[in-house]
Image (cartoon, rainbow, N blue to C red):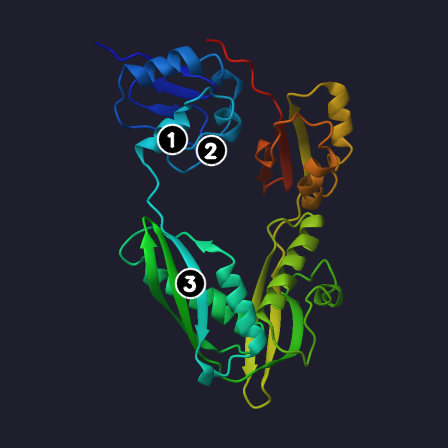
């Protein structure tokens, strides 16, 4: 006997599988393979069918995920929740740092000790509860918490270790003491900092002098990886406002041991400059649409990613109450160098029993 199946809302439903009809990558995506009983099937027929045809969105790659616009409109329990329950997330420990100790012979500056201790004790770590979770957490603390703080103070080649000593456990909660050791190495100052094009035949569309000013690190100051990171983020924002949403900064450091300095070269791979191709709204009337579109770049103009990021803050008063940043999709077309922006602001219909 043939199994029942049907198409709705871009999804193919049968008793065993859920496929997407218009996939993102040209192939149907298998959301569910495990055979389900009558409860699962009846939930589709009676509860999901009236809602799902509204949505023609691509299913995310992760197993068990539906488009957020679809999932938030489904009655409880939703399909996505049922799928997640089939693959429950791994248990996690809750690790509380109640004390941080430093090796006094290492010479770690007092301000760095204070910063490291404060950050470690102000959060609860939640690693996956497996046989190596304490070792993995030790490596994370040493690399991010300790080395990060010291590299921001010029100790570019610092080597650090962290050891966790459990004091007590209650269920998945565990309290630990962290003992930190570090070999600081030399303390470096910033040397020459330059901005260059990654393609010698393609000059930068923004002057190197302007781009250099976006990196908050000056020659002679202690070399700080955090300031370099901030500078790279600034570069991304500036290029994003000019339509270069795929721009990639490529930092390279050159250490001068004799003078105790580090030179930094940031090569900019500008990629393609995008303009706005189309803007579409679903779920709002024409008057609201005209108000919303005022805060966006017009078709033909350079695509300003910052305006898109600010859209929900600027228009919160007139947007549907359940509107989310995830309700916006931006599709790039490298051939035409345009983006198609779709705002799916449709609200959930009332559920019928």
Query: Residue 277 or 107: which is nearer the viewer?
Result: 107
Q: Position of residue 331 (x, y in %)?
A: 58, 37
The answer to whether 57 appears left or right of 236 in the picture is: left
The answer to whether 328 is drawn above or below residue 145 in the figure is: above
Q: Mark 3 and mark 2 in contact (Cβ < 8 Å)?
A: no
**Residue 112, image quadrant:** bottom right
Q: Earlier in the sequence, mark 2 or mark 1?
A: 2
- Residue on which disc 3 sits: 140
Report the mark closest to the observer, 1 or 3.
3
| Quadrant location, the N terminus | top left
Q: Earlier in the sequence, mark 2 or mark 3?
A: 2
**Residue 20, image quadrant:** top left
Q: Earlier in the sequence, mark 1 or mark 3?
A: 1
- Residue on which disc 2 sits: 24
Crowding around mark 3 (Cα neighbors within 10 Å: few <14, some 14 to 19, many 20+) is some
Q: Position of residue 199 (x, y in %)?
A: 61, 63
Kind of element beneath mark 1: loop
Query: Residue 22 or 93: which is nearer the viewer?
Result: 93
Using the numbered discs, state the Cα–Cα distance from disc 2 to disc 1 in whole angstroms: 9 Å
The answer to whether 61 appears left or right of 305 in the picture is: left
Kind of element beneath mark 2: loop
Using the numbered discs, state the Cα–Cα distance from disc 1 to disc 3 in whole angstroms: 35 Å
Q: Residue at x 73, y 59 (%)?
A: 206
Using the numbered discs, state the Cα–Cα distance from disc 2 to disc 3 in whole angstroms: 35 Å
Q: Residue at x 56, y 68 (%)?
A: 115
Q: Position of residue 332 (x, y in %)?
A: 59, 40
Q: Residue at x 54, y 87 (%)?
A: 257
The answer to whether 12 is drawn above or below residue 198 in the figure is: above
């Amino acid at each position: 006997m043939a199994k029942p199946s049907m198409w709705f809302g871009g999804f193919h439903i049968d008793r065993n599988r859920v496929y997407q009809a218009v996939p993102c990558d040209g192939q149907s995506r298998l959301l569910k393979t495990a055979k389900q009983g009558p409860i699962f099937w009846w939930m589709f027929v009676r509860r999901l069918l009236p809602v799902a045809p509204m949505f023609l969105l691509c299913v995310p790659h992760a197993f068990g995920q539906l488009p957020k616009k679809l999932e938030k409109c489904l009655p409880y329990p939703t399909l996505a929740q049922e799928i997640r329950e089939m693959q429950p997330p791994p248990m996690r420990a809750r690790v509380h740092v109640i004390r941080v100790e430093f090796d006094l012979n290492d010479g770690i500056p007092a301000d760095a000790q204070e910063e490291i201790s404060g950050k470690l004790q102000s959060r609860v770590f939640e690693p996956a509860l497996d046989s190596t979770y304490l070792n993995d957490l030790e490596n994370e603390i040493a690399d991010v918490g300790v080395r990060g703080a010291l590299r921001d103070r010029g100790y570019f080649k610092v080597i650090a270790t962290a050891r966790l000593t459990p004091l007590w456990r209650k269920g998945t909660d565990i309290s630990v003491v962290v003992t930190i050791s570090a070999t600081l190495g030399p303390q470096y100052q910033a040397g020459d900092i330059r901005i260059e094009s990654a393609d010698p035949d393609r000059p930068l569309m923004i002057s190197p002098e302007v781009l250099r000013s976006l990196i908050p690190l000056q020659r002679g100051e202690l070399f700080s990886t955090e300031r370099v990171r901030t500078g790279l983020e600034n570069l991304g924002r500036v290029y994003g406002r000019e339509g270069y949403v795929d721009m990639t900064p490529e930092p390279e450091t050159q250490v001068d041991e004799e003078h105790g300095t580090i030179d930094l070269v940031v090569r900019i791979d500008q990629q393609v400059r995008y303009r706005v191709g189309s803007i579409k709204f679903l779920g709002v009337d024409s008057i609201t649409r005209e108000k919303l579109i005022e805060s966006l770049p017009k078709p033909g103009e350079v695509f300003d990613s910052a305006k898109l990021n600010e859209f929900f803050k600027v228009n919160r008063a007139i947007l549907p109450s359940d509107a989310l940043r995830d309700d916006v999709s931006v599709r790039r077309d490298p051939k035409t160098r345009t983006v198609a922006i779709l705002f799916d602001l449709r609200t959930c219909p009332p559920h019928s029993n």
